[in-house]
């Protein structure tokens, strides 16, 4: 039996080129060390922001790019307008080719967008569901029109994650091959994927914006955080994203530094309302929020570097009048008595994706024990945790970080009853109606008022034990000039190397 890693290379498909011996030796590749390997490189099966999303953003282009502050800029679409409230028309960039030489045009957009509406891609690509898209049509080679069932106020947001591939390649190639050998029109071209080890990309010299400053990039899978940090300090790794406050200082050496930006990921413990009966009572969920001293956990576990959640919306879009529940064990005990659910047992599930998960769950369990609840902390294998999350099947609480987002309608829609990301199975028809109405309300003042109502409603209903915003901390080599994104995507085509 052959136990060697599977090697998937563009050279095997005839895309390679021999090195020219008279050229000066290029700079060594920039290496990104991540805690996990990718599971697919299919542009319509992005299952996490990083590393899958980061690599897809590098190989593929979307019609619109999301800037780090959440605003929008042209990418494959040069301009757009809305002829009617239910119609979006995009004018495409001319003279763009995919990395296999297929031409980019409106038909390429139609093929990719229609692919996002079929299984299994529609389980990850939410464009059709979230915009009520009904049809995408090519009006001419460089004009494409999207027709929706109602006003789609988040159309640009979802198009920023709707990547366009070469139409013939998508139509004639098996999904497994597309996921193993991606071809886009982005700033980088795929070279190889050695499963369990690394993905290698190289600059796309024919990219419409010109090739990126950094020529070669390697995304490595290095599961142990200590190993990632040791390699960063030794100079064999250039970027380690997603450091936690406890080890950020370990990224600093003569060759490396730590860079922090405000994070958008909302850490919480979700209450599974399809699980044990007491968690279906909002008084119990409020009691647990009062029972846990989040401020002390931030000071101790997060070294004071995290910020407490004050809303389910990320700033600057949150309602400033909302406040954390506050540590009040007497109030917590009173709410439990009022609900008639004292002294029950509850599971707190976690996986090891977040290095502080076990300790956070154990501290929370101790606080719950102080008000008479028996909390059992249970470690889940990462794959099982992800499956249970998707199935809304946790029996109690689960420690998780969600939503590195900066778009209120998208952040609120995850709590609607039928949302694929509603892992806690929160169900409130009044909330659903508010969000649905806001999503089609074009008057900004009226829409904000509806969003405020929905935001306060879900905050007080407590589908989560509200914890903190993780800061986004990256370890960077001193030769790499790059500002991390708060939403955790890595865009190395926006980076460059220091000249000295």
Image (cartoon, grey):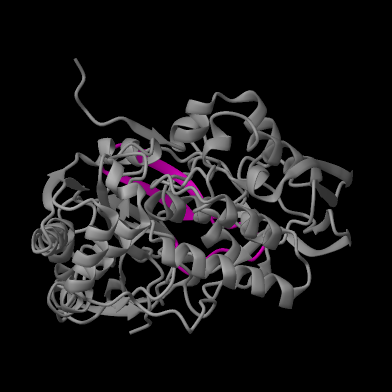
371 in relation to 445, above or below: above
The reply to whether residue 20 is in sight is no
Residue in the picture at 21% in, 19% down: 2
- Which corner quadrant of the image does residue 119 belong to? top right
Report if residue 201 lies within the magenta region: yes
User: Quarter holding the N terminus?
Assistant: top left
- Which corner quadrant of the image does residue 306 belong to? bottom left
Q: Position of residue 313 (x, y in %)?
A: 48, 69
Residue in the picture at 34% in, 77% down: 324
Provide the residue span drawn in magenta: 188-215
Q: Position of residue 367 (x, y in %)?
A: 12, 65
Camera-side residue: 367 or 12? 367
Residue in the picture at 80% in, 42% down: 136
User: Quarter holding the C terminus?
Assistant: bottom left
482 in relation to 357, above or below: below
Camera-side residue: 312 or 461? 461
Camera-side residue: 404 or 164? 404
Report if residue 112 lies within the magenta region: no
Residue in the picture at 30% in, 36% down: 195
């Amino acid at each position: 039996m052959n136990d060697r890693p599977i090697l998937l290379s563009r050279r095997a498909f005839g895309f390679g080129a021999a090195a020219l011996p008279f050229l000066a030796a290029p700079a060594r590749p920039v290496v990104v060390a991540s805690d996990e390997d990718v599971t697919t490189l299919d542009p319509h099966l992005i299952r996490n922001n990083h590393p899958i999303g980061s690599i897809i953003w590098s190989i593929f282009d979307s019609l619109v790019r999301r800037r780090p502050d959440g605003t929008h800029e042209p990418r494959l679409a040069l301009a757009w307008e809305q002829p009617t409230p239910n119609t979006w028309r995009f004018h495409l960039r001319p003279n763009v080719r995919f990395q296999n030489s297929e031409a980019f045009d409106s038909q390429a957009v139609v093929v990719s967008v229609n692919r996002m509406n079929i299984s299994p891609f529609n389980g990850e690509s939410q464009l059709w569901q979230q915009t009520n898209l009904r049809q995408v049509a090519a009006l001419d080679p460089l004009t494409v029109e999207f027709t929706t069932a109602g006003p789609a106020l988040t159309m640009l947001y979802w198009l920023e994650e709707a990547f366009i591939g070469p139409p013939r390649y998508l139509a004639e190639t098996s999904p497994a091959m597309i996921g193993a050998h991606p071809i886009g029109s982005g700033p980088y071209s795929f070279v190889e994927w050695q499963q369990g080890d690394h993905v290698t990309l190289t600059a796309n010299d024919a990219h419409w914006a010109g090739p990126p400053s950094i020529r070669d990039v390697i995304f490595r899978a290095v599961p142990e955080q200590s190993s990632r940090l040791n390699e960063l300090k030794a100079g064999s790794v250039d970027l380690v994203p997603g450091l936690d406050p406890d080890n950020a200082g370990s990224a600093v050496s003569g060759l490396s530094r730590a860079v922090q930006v405000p994070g958008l990921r909302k850490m919480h413990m979700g209450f599974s309302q399809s699980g044990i009966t007491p968690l279906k009572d909002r008084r119990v969920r409020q009691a647990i929020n009062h029972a846990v001293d989040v401020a002390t956990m931030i000071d101790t576990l997060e070294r004071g570097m995290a910020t407490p959640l004050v809303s389910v919306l990320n700033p600057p879009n949150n309602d400033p009048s909302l406040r954390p529940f506050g540590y009040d064990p007497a109030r917590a005990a009173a709410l439990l008595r009022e609900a008639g659910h004292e002294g029950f047992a509850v599971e707190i599930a976690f996986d090891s994706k977040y290095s502080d998960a076990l300790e956070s769950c154990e501290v929370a369990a101790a606080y719950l024990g102080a008000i008479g609840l028996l909390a059992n902390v249970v470690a889940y294998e990462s794959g099982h945790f992800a499956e249970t999350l998707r199935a809304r099947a946790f029996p109690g609480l689960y420690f998780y970080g969600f939503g590195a987002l900066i778009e209120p309608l998208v952040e609120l829609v995850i709590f609607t009853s039928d949302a694929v990301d509603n892992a806690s199975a929160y169900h409130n028809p009044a909330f659903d109606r508010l969000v649905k109405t806001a999503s089609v309300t074009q008057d900004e003042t009226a829409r904000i008022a509806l969003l405020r109502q929905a935001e306060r409603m879900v905050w007080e209903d407590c589908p989560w034990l509200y914890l903190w915003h993780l800061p986004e901390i990256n370890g960077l080599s001193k030769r790499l000039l790059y500002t991390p994104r708060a939403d955790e995507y890595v865009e190395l085509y926006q980076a460059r190397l220091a000249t000295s």
